[in-house]
Image: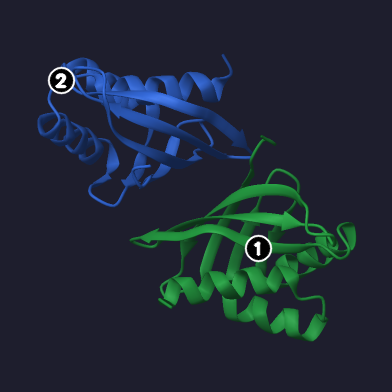
Chain colours: A green, B blue
Amino acid sequence: MTEVATLIDGYISMWNETDPERRRALVARTWADDARYVDPLVTGEGRDGIDAMIAGVQQQFPGHRFELATGPDAHHDRVRFSWHLVADGGSRVATGVDFGTLSTEGRLQSVTGFHEQPA
Amino acid sequence: MTEVATLIDGYISMWNETDPERRRALVARTWADDARYVDPLVTGEGRDGIDAMIAGVQQQFPGHRFELATGPDAHHDRVRFSWHLVADGGSRVATGVDFGTLSTEGRLQSVTGFHEQPA
């Protein structure tokens, strides 16, 4: 795996990690200190804010998992990839695309999520 | 049209405008002063750099036009849309997606382009 592929692999794992301590470790490995996440429904500022935001999404979608759909596709300090949110029984309940910028240390500095319209 | 739709309409027109004075006016209307564009092949810093970059792309693809394919899709100060590059005879020679952030004045602050793989 390239460094960016490893980073985005950890990012997806982070969204799926419901153990607070392990999730927090994944957040710290994935994001820069002063990182920011924003999508149409939720936002998170800094590692603490992002961790709390993910915990909230997990409570809203119990038993669901995020899966990488396409990418990551990266150039310069920019990356994009798409994902599916999959329910307990295996059905896809949402699909989206995330755009990110990387910090000089190779962590995520900023991520913007967009939701695809259901086909 | 929403303000963002008007902005992205002007952005596409800017890429297609080969008259230097009119292109320069579209650049000024579309971008913040200290804007930045980056895609896998070219980059432009500030309005002067972006204008020169577009002139270079136009020389590389004479007779081609950009067309909006999907979007714009916007939330907060973020926008995404996709485009086709169409040759003189009408065939699509490239497709990509642009992801942008907006300045407080509603102009483009930063745009990252990605190229789709040919289907």
Report the residue at 48% width, 34% height from top. B81
Q: Residues within 10 Å of mark 2 (few under 14, many from 20)?
A: few
Tag 2 near tag 1, CB within 8 Å: no
Q: Is residue B47 left or right of residue A58?
A: left
Determine the chain carrying the residue at label 2.
Answer: B
Describe the element under mark 2 as helix, strand or loop: loop
Residue A116 versus residue B11: which sits nearer the camera?
A116
Q: Distance between the residues labelled 2 and 1?
A: 42 Å
The residue depicted at 65 percent of the width and 52 percent of the height is A38
The x, y position of residue B54, in whole percent, is 21, 33
Q: Which of B84 and B40 is in front in this view?
A: B84
Left or right, residue A6 beside residue A33: left
Q: Please, what secondary structure does the residue beneath circle 1 have?
A: strand
Q: Quadrant of residue B23?
A: top left
Q: Any mark on residue B63, and which? A: 2
Quadrant of the snapshot with the C terminus of chain A: top right
Q: Which of B3 and A81 is in front in this view?
A: A81
Tell me, for residue A67, which label it has, or none: 1
A55 relative to B62, above or below: below
Mark 2 is on which residue type? Gly
